[in-house]
Image: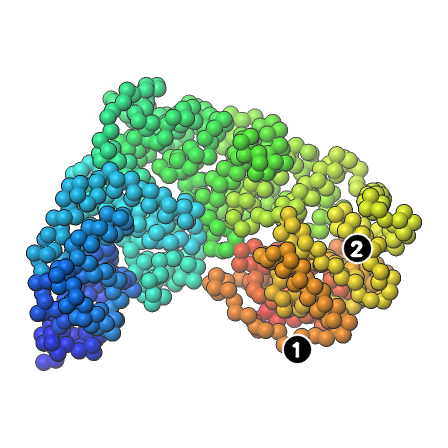
Amino acid sequence: MELSSEDLIKKSDSKNLSITTCKTFLENESSLIDQKLNRGNVNKILNARTKINDTAVIKIAEKFFENQKKYISLIAIGGYGRKELYPNSDTDLLILIEGKKKKSLQKPIREFLTFLWDVGIEASHSTRTLNECLKEGRKDVSVATSLIESRYLYGSKDLFKRFLEKINKKGAFWKNKKFLEEKMLEQTNRHLQFNNTAYNLEPNIKNGPGGLRDLHNIFWIAKKIFSIKSIKELENLKILTKEQITDFESSWALLSRIRYSLHKITNRPENRLLFDYQRTLASNFGYKDQKHLLAVEVFMQDYYKAAKSISRLNEISLQILEQKILNRTRRKSEQISSFEIINNLIGLKKDITFADNPSLLLEIFLQFQKNKNIKGIQSETINQIIESLDLINNSFRNNEENKRLFLEILKAPEGVTHELKRMNLYGVLGLYIPSFGKIEGRMQYDLFHAFTVDEHTLNVVSNLRRLALSRFDHEYPDDSIKMQSIENQKILYIAGLYHDIAKGRGGDHSIIGAKEAEKFCLAHGLTNYDAKLVSWLVENHLVFSLTAQKKDIHDPNVIEELAKIIGDESRLDYLYLLTVSDVRATNPSLWNSWKERLFNDLYRLTKNSLRAGLENPIDKKSIVREKKELTKEHLLNLGNDKRAADALLKEFKENYFLKFNQDEINNQMDFLLNEQEYGSNLDLINLRQLETEGLISIFILTDISSENFFLITSVLEEKNLSIRDAKVVQLDDEKCIFNFYIDRPNLSFSEIKERNLKIKSLLLERLDTKELISKKKNKPLPRKLRSFDTEIQINFLTDTVNKRTVMELICLDRPGLLLDISKVFKNEKIWIESAKIATIGERAEDVFYLRDNNQEMISEQIHLNLEKSIRNSLAHQ
């Protein structure tokens, strides 16, 4: 009968143990264990993997240490010590040796570690004497923590026993208070690395907030202080309830299963739940697409709920452990209504329960806003809140006192965001506003939204609050002035809470959310006017942003259209503030100086239109006249000749002054007035750094040709420059202006200046020779983009007023996209009047304003040709 790999290794003579035998054993047994992942208990699977690793390590140790067994002790520490060995985790080993045998053990230890490596066991090891262990452990709390989880494997049991006695001796290794403080500080610093949120879209499930390390931290501290062996012992210690321990174990099981799977599909110790793997794991775990949600979104929502639960359990446990360990003297308590404050922690008075007065479930959060000395909630009261959540029902929500309390929280002078987030953490907010409960932990599978919907929503409210508080005026001074001048800030907070509340339910979330927001406002006693305003803000919360990013805001017709939607200056202020707070809360990298300038320009233009009155359409001639006067004043202030300035301005038609803003016109005119070659047939180029916007402006005066847009973009593509915006204005029958904005590289001023000269030289060469790049370099798609399959959408709109065609393109963003599109336009002899380039996460959402060779709108047939050519071009990438 053929022996199994396990029998083979166990019955093998240690001295003659081969690498092949060990590798076969590890591979076969690991494969059998991996097959059980989707149907087995992950804790048992990790234990089984640890067991086969133990078998191999011990057998290999026998091969090299049999004669020195009494001088050495092999100890499993860290994750390996607690029997949580994931497929690609290191085997954490402490090789404890007797000091007098240190030299004679060097060779067998080296051979032992080499053998481990050869069979596929990656050992993270340290070789120390007993005194060295204590010395290193006292210096570093991370080392001390790993030693706490020590487990005997092989060698001298007496040496291992002495080791345990030393590290467990009260006060000899780490004093309890110091250990607690260091572990809590370590956790705080770790959380800061992940923006202090569990709701990142690519979370680190091991080290991030709400990750496995937060659960481990509870266990480590309790093990150090109370010598627990199992998390279940926390019930007897009155740290967690039986139900909370069940929650602890189920949350740990989900995250452990995810981590195990990540190790298997990446074949490395991967702890980041990247977009690359989320779809695969959702499928492997049996998730299916639902009516309005992708399987991956449902899977990630379960993850975020588990992370939220872990964060809550971590807070409760550490607070109780802190109270037990520090054994604080009970100070005189401060009595407030039904509460008492002890050591800056608020809790219910004795003999008072939430069941007696459910309104206290809201009032406790209001007390934080009224008393700045309150730093947290007593752990016992946190448990009472969680156990009383079923009291928040329809009767609770319809109670007038509860409505009053919630509005008091919203309009409090301090702590609005903090308390909404605290209410969300403990599950109160999602029950008081059931619609909010539906978006808890809800992700959107894209690169645009950096947070879950509930986290993003609370960040919007936070941004609004910061604008309302004078101590944050330095962040966005102009916006702070607007916010602090708003008549009713509460309207914006409610609009912020409801603007995305209907996401994931199908239909237009803005319309659904608007109806629910109005209903909420009326139920909470707001006037009909205020309720309608909140509803209007929610329904139109995307209008301002879409206009700024997708339309030509220097087209008076666009401004008139937006002004008609908004109606008056008061609504403009409300909508603008909600919009900028929303965009800034969507993704930390989304808001920049360019976007700030764009939004400010749109706000100013719309405000001017509203002040003129909707019955008085914007007069283009007045705009042109005003811009010419301001430009002339600017040129004269710089010392330019008056007659030369007048002559230059006369050469430019109305379209030029309508297309560019005043800053652009001033700089372009100043450049041309002082450019000796102006008036010749030579191409003129000027690159200018915009320090505050983080951009470089590229101004090009050249001949009219449908090839030029492609030639210019090919140069910018070669130089790896990212285009933000592009405008083209025809001056006469022969000349036109191209104006591009590109991202400013992270280089010094002198380096950028030198680089700009090279770009200018290459542009002049290409425009002169009309030489096209022979072959575009195919650049690999960035990692994050590979996980998305964005449907190509191409729409054509007719702008009869301006005699042009508007083409909207939505597709997967990628290197060289604009170059490919401009090549299609070149081949079809299409004139690009301007382009709005927008990257929304993984999607490119670009808008092109087009004319044919005769400067007319393009025909239906050319629409079809363009769409076919663009789809073919994108499909072959």
> Residue 90: which quarter of the image?
bottom left
CA–CA distance in space, label 2 to label 1: 33 Å
Q: Quadrant of the N terminus?
A: bottom left
Residue pictured at 68% horizontal, 54% vertical: 689
**Residue 207 place in picture, x, y as percent:** 35, 51
Residue at image mark 2: 671
In terms of secondary structure, where does tag 2 sit? helix
Q: Is residue 824 visible?
A: no
Residue pictured at 19% horizontal, 50% vertical: 134
User: Farthest residue in the bottom direction?
Assistant: 1
Viewer-side label of 2, 1: 2
> Residue 610: which quarter of the image?
top right
Residue pictured at 17% horizontal, 57% vertical: 129
Residue type, numbered disc 1 = Ser
**Residue 68 place in picture, x, y as percent:** 10, 67
**Residue 529 place in picture, x, y as percent:** 60, 28
**Residue 323 place in picture, x, y as percent:** 25, 33
In terms of secondary structure, where does tag 1 sit? loop
